[in-house]
Image (spheres, rainbow, N blue to C red):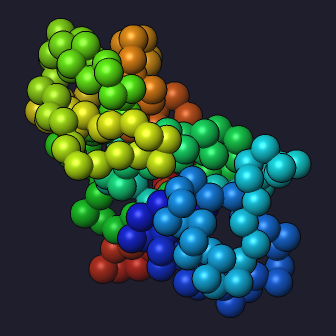
Amino acid sequence: MGTGSTTNYFIDELAGIRHVFDAAVSSSEDSAARLRERGIQVIDLNAAPQVDVYVDGADEVNRRRQLIKGGGAALTREKIVAAAADQFVCIVDASKLVDTLGAYPLPVEVIPMARSLVARGIVQLGGQPIWRQDVVTDNGNWILDIHEFMLADPVAMERSLNQLTGAVCNGLFASRPADVVLIATEQGVETL
């Protein structure tokens, strides 16, 4: 289970069918608490023999099912659970669908002592990093949001950001895109 407002709605609906699955793995402490409140058993990813399906929202998505995630500052854990899952299902509304990723600020989780070092590296890559002050991830790290960073090649940029010393993870889900994206539109649900 992912993190955020869309996921919260999904968790609420999931509670009605909690008898059809054994347990859930969560990408954040907030989602784990909500799952438990709804009577759903939450287990650590290390204790899960497999993760059949990972369900989460996104801040932006393109038609290649590549995503920007991390507006809720859970990007590292979200990326870990997505990588462990057999299938990654993303649920968004039509406002999240874009031609080119990058209008939404791209989050990068950083080790606190490396914030300025990573920020300088981001500037060299063409982005404008802004520290999301007063936000600490569940991992105890900080978030830099990259503004004005339109991504012509999300896979290459994901790799470049991963190489910045002190960067823990970035919110590009391009190397491992969603398997299915469900888009709520005025005409119904569109599936990518």
Q: x, y percentage for residue 191?
A: 50, 62
Hey, which residue is sitting farthest bottom in the picture? 16
Residue 64 or residue 17, whichever sits in front: 17
Residue in the picture at 88% in, 48% down: 49
Left or right of residue 61, residue 116 in this image:
left
Find residue 52 and report its horizontal and vertical position in percent. 77, 55
Q: Residue at x 70, y 41 (%)?
A: 84
- Left or right side of 28 for 36: right
In the displayed structure, does residue 75 sit left or right of residue 97? right
Quadrant assignment, res 21: bottom right
Say how many tags the image has: 0
The percent coordinates of residue 158 (x first, y second) are: 40, 23
- 191 or 36: nearer the viewer: 36
Q: Is residue 146 above or below residue 38?
A: above
Residue at 33% of width from left, 37% of height from top? 142
Q: Quadrant of residue 125 in the image?
A: top left
Q: Nearer the viewer, residue 33 or 122?
A: 33
Quarter of image, res 155: top left
Residue 28 visible in the current orientation = yes
Above-or-below relation of 173 to 22: above
Q: Position of residue 53 (x, y in %)?
A: 70, 57
Decide if residue 133 is on the left or right side of residue 185.
left
Quadrant location of the N terminus in the rendered image: bottom right
Residue occupying image coordinates x 53% and y 47%: 78
Q: Is residue 27 above or below residue 8?
A: above
Would you say residue 70 is visible in this rendering? no
Which residue sits furthest right? 49
